[in-house]
Amino acid sequence: MRTVSTKSAICEAHSKLILVGEHAVVYGKPAIAIPFPLKVRVIIQKAVGPIMFESSIYTGPIDKIPAKMEGIKACIEETLRYANQPFENLRIRIDSDIPLGRGLGSSAAIAIAIVRSLFSLFEQKLSKEHLFSLVQIAETYAHGKPSGIDTVAEISEHPIWFQKEKEIVPLTIGRPLYIVVADTGRNGDTHTAVDNVRKRYASETAKVQNSLDEIARIVELAREAILNGDIYLLGDLLYRNQEELKILGVSDDELNHLIDIARNEGALGAKLTGGGLGGCMLALGKSLEHAEVIAKRLMDSGASNVWYFSTEENILYSPK
């Protein structure tokens, strides 16, 4: 009989949205990411025997974890090593509202919540630097050579300005943003999207470089629009960013369709978010009520799931 301790640790992590700058960020350009209130919750208890894992994807001993979750296993193993604890005697349960493979940072969120829970369980202090390095172990398995933007954005409670190997800058929003997120219902293929951009860069260097440079300019202008509370300028910049992502070949017909639906409902701006080739898109509304109208229209137009929220409250709503 497996003995489970009453002592447990429970920690959460939120997901993220890349507001502007995806793909260009891989080439050293800046990007802006914001917290998204979809969350994952991890419960860890001490229990005698091998580590047991419970999630919607897999339940069983960690040694038999599926290949697509090897990064989580490696992250747990390194975290326990760092905490000077054995790789055993735990029960780990994951309850996540974040859909997998949609560009919302689910893998990073799960790893963040696990690392936080392990440090809490063993009553050890955890710095942001160590949290980042441990989570990046899982992210490397999931994404190959991750930029780090998912992890940083999900550790932060505020919008961030991100550029590889440069200081992360938190951004103050001059006026609340009313954001709608629609899920195509299809996994985004980040590996393929990034590889496609790389191949296109090799064959059409000047054209792709122009798009990457334009996205960087858009991100610079978006930062000023956010700080100044100019949501109309920000919306226009979202549309401009989407046009460059189409040139890079990472959007697709379904994403384009949902973006057109949002535009027809008066969205100030709309674009894909994340890797593209599936996954999610976002739209910017004029108010929370307007965001609800856009959300309902997107749901009626074939989106598999839709959420909307205000950055002022970070309370997530779904259209009724």
Image (cartoon, rainbow, N blue to C red):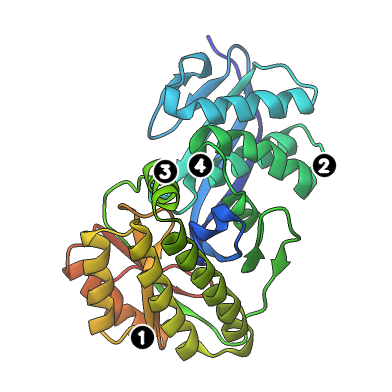
Circle 4 residue: 107
* Foreground tag (2 vs 3): 3
Q: Residue at x 76, y 21 (%)?
A: 85
Occupied quadrant, residue 2: top right
Mark pair 4, 3: CA separation: 20 Å
- Please rate how many residues cluster around mark 2, counting C-alpha atoms within 10 Å: few if below 14, some from 14 to 19, many from 20: few
Mark pair 2, 3: CA separation: 38 Å
Q: Which residue is drawn at 64% across and 84% down?
A: 227
Q: Quadrant of the C terminus?
A: bottom left
Q: Reading the chain from its start, which is encountered first: label 4 or label 2?
A: 4
Q: Residue 195 carries which label?
A: 3
Mark 4 touching mark 3, by CB under 8 A? no
Q: Which amino acid does label 2 sit on?
A: Lys
List x then y, in percent, for residue 40. Answer: 51, 48
Q: Which amino acid does label 4 sit on?
A: Ser
Q: Reading the chain from its start, which is encountered first: label 1 or label 3?
A: 3
Occupied quadrant, residue 168: bottom right
Residue with the most extreme left position = 301
Using residue 141 as the reference point, say whether residue 100 is left or right of it.
Answer: left
Q: Reading the chain from its start, which is encountered first: label 2 or label 1?
A: 2
Circle 2 residue: 125
Circle 1 residue: 289
Q: Which amino acid does label 1 sit on?
A: Glu
